[in-house]
Image: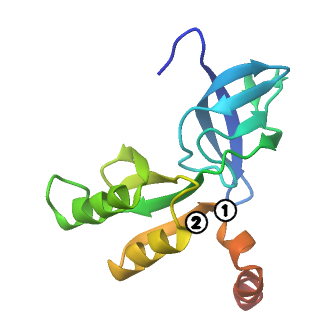
Amino acid sequence: MSNDSTAKVLFRVPDDDGGATVETLWAVPLGNDCYKLDNSPFYAYGVSWQDTVLAPFDSQEQFSTFQSIVTKSGNRTIRVLFDPPVSPGNTSDQVLQGLVALGCSYEGANPMYISVNIPAFVELQAVRSHLIEHDAQWEHADPTYESLFPDEAQLVNQADR
């Protein structure tokens, strides 16, 4: 994917231990520190493929570093953890191919961890129903679970205390 018209944008994703996971996403420079994301996130939340982000160069990070979202693309992101790993024709592959049949696309970090892009024309509820029906392990990345279900997320947070 790397060529003269692409760059990397760094995202720092806070973890439960007070640290952060670093993820760099391919992006197309648009000028004025703006970039259009050119792949789906595996760790970052609240962003999706083709979103435009503001990412000024950070001399400490030595990367253009995510600061904010400029424009949402309409794409959404979920991440699926497959066990068994996706292999042609197995049950995990059938679940993944069902998502493709709904209109989704995907990128794999490896055969067990897949970032799924849900285009604007695909019903999020149809994707959710498909994953629930197949007892898949998955998470909302963009929009986040907390933004979709703020009341439930608040109850979970209170129960964790």
Front-most of residues 121 and 52: 121
Q: Is residue 101 visible?
A: yes
Can you give x and y, in whole percent of width and height, for residue 89 in the image?
14, 58
In the rendered view, tell whether residue 145 sits above or below residue 9.
Answer: below
Q: Is residue 84 visible?
A: no
Instruction: Say which residue appears at 47% left-offset and 22% top-offset.
Output: 1
Q: Which mark is residue 143?
A: 1
Q: CA distance from mark 2 to mark 1?
A: 6 Å
* The residue positioned farthest toward the top in the image shown: 4
Q: How many marks?
A: 2
Callout 2 touching callout 1 (CB < 8 Å) = yes
* Residue type for callout 1: Pro
Q: Quadrant of residue 104?
A: bottom left
Instruction: Say which residue appears at 38% left-offset and 45% top-offset.
Output: 108
From the viewer's perspective, is 121 left or right of 89?
A: right
Q: Quadrant of residue 38?
A: top right
In the rendered view, tell whether residue 122 sits above or below residue 128.
Answer: above
Can you give x and y, in whole percent of width and height, for residue 15 in the image?
67, 58
* The residue positioned farthest toward the front in the image shown: 121
Dot 1 crowding, Cα within 10 Å, few <14, some 14–19, many 20+: some
In the rendered view, tell whether residue 127 sits above or below residue 121.
Answer: below
Can you give x and y, in whole percent of width and height, for residue 70 in the image?
82, 40
From the viewer's perspective, is 75 left or right of 35?
A: left
Quarter holding the C terminus is: bottom right
Q: Which mark is residue 39?
A: none
Instruction: Say which residue appears at 69% left-offset and 86% top-offset.
Output: 156
Q: Which mark is residue 140?
A: 2
Front-most of residues 107 and 127: 127
* Residue type for callout 2: His
From the viewer's perspective, is 51 left or right of 93?
A: right
Q: Secondary structure at mark 2?
A: strand
